[in-house]
Amino acid sequence: MSPKITLELLRQLRQAMKSSKYVSEPIQAYIIPSGDAHQSEYIAPCDCRREFISGFNGSAGTAIVTEQHAAMWTDGRYFLQASQQMDSNWTLMKMGLKETLTQEDWLISVLPENSRVGVDPWIIAADQWKSMAKALSGAGHSLVAVQENLIDAIWVDRPARPSTQLIALGLKYTGLTWQEKVVALRSKMSERKISWFVVTALDEIAWLFNLRGSDIEYNPVFFAYAIVGMRTIRLFIDEKRMVNADVREHLQLDTPSSSELSIQLAPYESVHSELCAICAGLGPREKVWISDKASCALTEAIPKVHRSLIPYTPLCLSKAVKNPTEIQGMKMAHIKDAVALCELFAWLEKEIPKGTVTEISAADKAEEFRSQQLDFVGLSFPTISSVGPNGAIIHYRPLPETNRTLTLKEIYLIDSGAQYRDGTTDVTRTVHFGTPSAYEKECFTYVLKGHIAVSAAIFPNGTKGHLLDSFARSALWDCGLDYLHGTGHGVGCFLNVHEGPCGISYKTFADEPLESGMILSDEPGYYEDGSFGIRIENVVLVVPAKPKYNYRNRGSLTFEPVTLVPIQVKMINTEMLTQKERDWLNEYHRQCRDIVGAELERQGRKEALDWLIRETQPITN
Amino acid sequence: MSPKITLELLRQLRQAMKSSKYVSEPIQAYIIPSGDAHQSEYIAPCDCRREFISGFNGSAGTAIVTEQHAAMWTDGRYFLQASQQMDSNWTLMKMGLKETLTQEDWLISVLPENSRVGVDPWIIAADQWKSMAKALSGAGHSLVAVQENLIDAIWVDRPARPSTQLIALGLKYTGLTWQEKVVALRSKMSERKISWFVVTALDEIAWLFNLRGSDIEYNPVFFAYAIVGMRTIRLFIDEKRMVNADVREHLQLDTPSSSELSIQLAPYESVHSELCAICAGLGPREKVWISDKASCALTEAIPKVHRSLIPYTPLCLSKAVKNPTEIQGMKMAHIKDAVALCELFAWLEKEIPKGTVTEISAADKAEEFRSQQLDFVGLSFPTISSVGPNGAIIHYRPLPETNRTLTLKEIYLIDSGAQYRDGTTDVTRTVHFGTPSAYEKECFTYVLKGHIAVSAAIFPNGTKGHLLDSFARSALWDCGLDYLHGTGHGVGCFLNVHEGPCGISYKTFADEPLESGMILSDEPGYYEDGSFGIRIENVVLVVPAKPKYNYRNRGSLTFEPVTLVPIQVKMINTEMLTQKERDWLNEYHRQCRDIVGAELERQGRKEALDWLIRETQPITN
């Protein structure tokens, strides 16, 4: 990997920072955040501005360029990668180390007095803007919104913004028409006396209109904004993609029913001016909802007296609680996904002894098996296929230069998932094709105990997911072990594999309470640098539980596994399990055998079925 | 209980709200918070202003009086009590109910346009001021600091501020001289480039100077402020209490050593003007530390550019981590406390069958036994002595009109503690003097399992207490049960029985990580309205643990019980315990027998010793 040569690019950027074409007065620093205008986790190539200017393409990082310096803030996952991808014009600012200055402190330390710091207001969130502006003004500088993006200005061959074909999802996938979703949204708006709601998150727009796209890899979303009022619905989108007859029919663009449910189309770029026009016409007490994670540009378009910032939008909350059709779809998607993985593991058992299977070829094979399943659309994230020490790199993705061969000697960890029209999957299994050591089994068993502790937990209605995080760690903690990531994230239904507002993590207090119908991952792990990684991940559904008592009529919840792929018994030290844990495992394997077995049978996949039956024999200790 | 007659008082208050003697322009509303100028949890009689104006004397409540209305906000614990103690001039605002307006919304709904709302800036915290001021100004009103307290203005026979005698604690109790504590504080200040630190919390001042008072019942503190600079120490305190030779010697008031460690005394009331004078002399980059919970008056005295608000002061953090002398003292205090409780329980067993013991007489007897112990100072909080259904009232305190007799038929819960010169205790035991029902035993055993789960938990260094809260609930949750309070709080050493910055609760994320040397309570419970309450509370010490492995060299922690009072085996369904839980209980009881037994022997308390030996027999299932 050789670093990107950035001298000339930086010269051009610094010129733009002084050019009256872009700024009324020169700016002394320019901030280049990672995100897009929708604060997406994954972004399209046209939005990879930080990578373009620096060469560093990790998923997290912020670049700041001044007249003299160019600096990149990123976290521990990316120290090595960033230092390899960036040339000597760049200084790596290692976040999380005590001696590393924050962006604000660094700017204050390097800037001349009364400096102007520029940023594109579309790709900085309003709250980030606020804290940065405050810190800078406290030191005599000012934060300035630069309307034209200065990276775009110097990016000669910048890819176009994707405008892929849209898929209209029918009721059999969504359970609710988009009209019903709009009506439900409006009823929440009127409860809170809200006149307008500005939808900025791409997955919320896709979910609301029952549309999917492929503008961003792995995430079936499309670039758009929406503004929903009590009587109007405006969709801001590239009109070219609206020529498809299915989509026009789906949105009833040509046969409007009631006027409150007819959609007005407008160009993607016009959202700001339209929002300003709407706000200009507001009565004195009218309020506009917008996510507190929305861009500074759109947030500021709403005058403060009318602005109502919300941490989780009503769409985010509704989307998280899957309806019966979505639950059915997610279950079906996971059965198909399990079929593909049974095939993969059966194939691996046969092929690995030949010495020809690598991390990359195994990942490719997994994709191949998945692609044979009905309604397969694509992967839901880059497959983590890792052998031995590579398994300890939590966000590993095999590259030709790191690619290891699968053997009978090392642990293999595969974390993968797919998008099907009926649901999104995300599953991790850790397996050994030879004989695991006693220590490897011991560690695996602690992780399994943690997985079961969460999956089988019973907890009162209203409990937030972060309160369950320690259950996943308790067995590891007892022996002085731990893992440095959260335990679970929300999963979309044929949508983003990571979604809010629920999760299971020690890191946040801002998660919303778990509700029946929410779908999350349960994925504790253990990682030993330089030797192996273990993770056991199921997607689980929150369901009502019926324990013996019912304190204050609050009701209880628990989880039901949606993922149905055997957990390798060979990796378990069964003596370390309690009877309750053994019962859980046997019952889980029974379900895998019955449900996935029937589907394998139906699809005539004999070898995989044999493998499944072998791998789901009850354990007895 | 008849309500307080408040018509005339309210008339006088409303007159004061318009009087040019107190306000430059009339105010249309006056807020009366609960607290004192130090944001103390317990307050002195002279600070019970909300009680004086309304009659309501619960621990939490805020009164607001307008020209037309008088309203009281309090929470579910006090709905009944407040409605009984207040007359018809008052409206009870039930916090936590959906239909109840917040103070801000209520004010906005009742006030005429452009109203002025007054509050004493000394008894409202700076952050509360800020949010109230923001809400009011958003609706066209303003929040106004009224320098003279208007309740004090009309309170004819207001008690004087207490100025009790101070006790100087020697090294054998404190482990560190106050000079050493000042030096350590200054080193933290200089690390963070802080010039001055304003100490406002009474327990921090007491801890820093190794002094104790009795200005507030149960809390051995005294009214004072301190301002510590790098070269000066100012103590703001009633000078009359500084005539005691011991205290003068202790503070070296007459024989100053180095000038940096000599204390300048100033009147309690002069802290504001002194702080203003200090701030007037600050260089442009100098910073002053003050707690973000300090009063608005003192916070605002520091110009914003110099102000550095901190959630937990360095004194709060140092005080929480007990030094070896303090740990030794806490252990000794708990042994003496256990002696008193063994005596109590032995006495109760004998006396209850006679039918003469009540909640109040049992509490008195407990105090009597405690008072016989060396260095006893007083109780650390009002004793919760509750029989049967009274046990389900979490903050119960027996009153003549609620007083029940202890019998062989109902569960008895006693939550009590004392201040000794060497430490503070807080212990809850739930016992049955006859035969508990299977259901009572079942519930008790869930609570015990939760108590043990926390007490025996092993967790990595750096873990915050809130991550352990669910361990205490897991057994209850499994059966659909729960309790609606936190699991643990920090405990001071001959100081406040509730102290920050650590705790074990699902309610906060702002607790500081647990560290070896911190002392907390572990007190899960279960309460069945109208029938019984169960709580098992030990004070526990955070100690290093040595599990099998040591992931990333982070080290592990666990708890060691400091409370050594037997847990009644009769209440346990031993079949529900795991072997690990049985081992924990047997080992705990062995320690009680060995350590407390030796002290009972030494003190020649034969009956209590017999009781202890009987109650600590190992269980075998």
Image: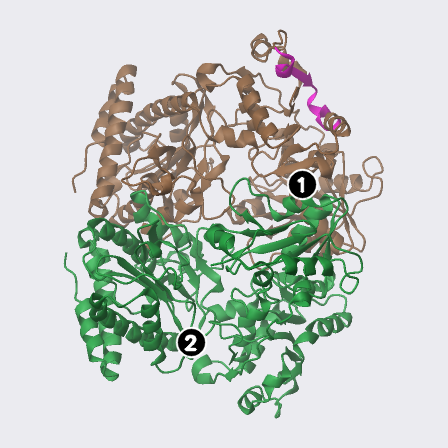
Chain colours: A brown, B green
Tell me which amino acid carries mark 2: Gly
Instruction: Work out whether residue B518 can be spotted.
Output: yes
Tell me which amino acid carries mark 1: Ala
- Judge the density around disc 1: few (<14), some (14-19), many (≥20) Cα neighbours within 10 Å: many
Which tag is nearer the camera, tag 1 or tag 2? 2
Q: Which mark is residue B378?
A: 2
Residue under pointer 1: A126
Q: Secondary structure at mark 2?
A: strand
**Membership of B512 in magenta stretch:** no
**Membership of A268 in magenta stretch:** yes
Magenta stretch bounds: A258-273
Give how far apart the Cα atoms at labels 1 and 2 are.
54 Å
The answer to which of B516 and B267 lies nearer the viewer is: B267
The answer to which of B297 and B503 lies nearer the viewer is: B297
Residue that appears at 49% across and 54% down? B84
Looking at the image, residue B104 lies above or below residue B487: above
B111 sits left or right of B472 in the view: right
Q: Quadrant of residue B619?
A: bottom left
Q: Chain of mark 1?
A: A
The answer to which of B436 and A395 lies nearer the viewer is: B436
Residue B470, position as x, y percentages in the image = 38, 50
Instruction: Work out whether residue A236 can be spotted.
Output: no
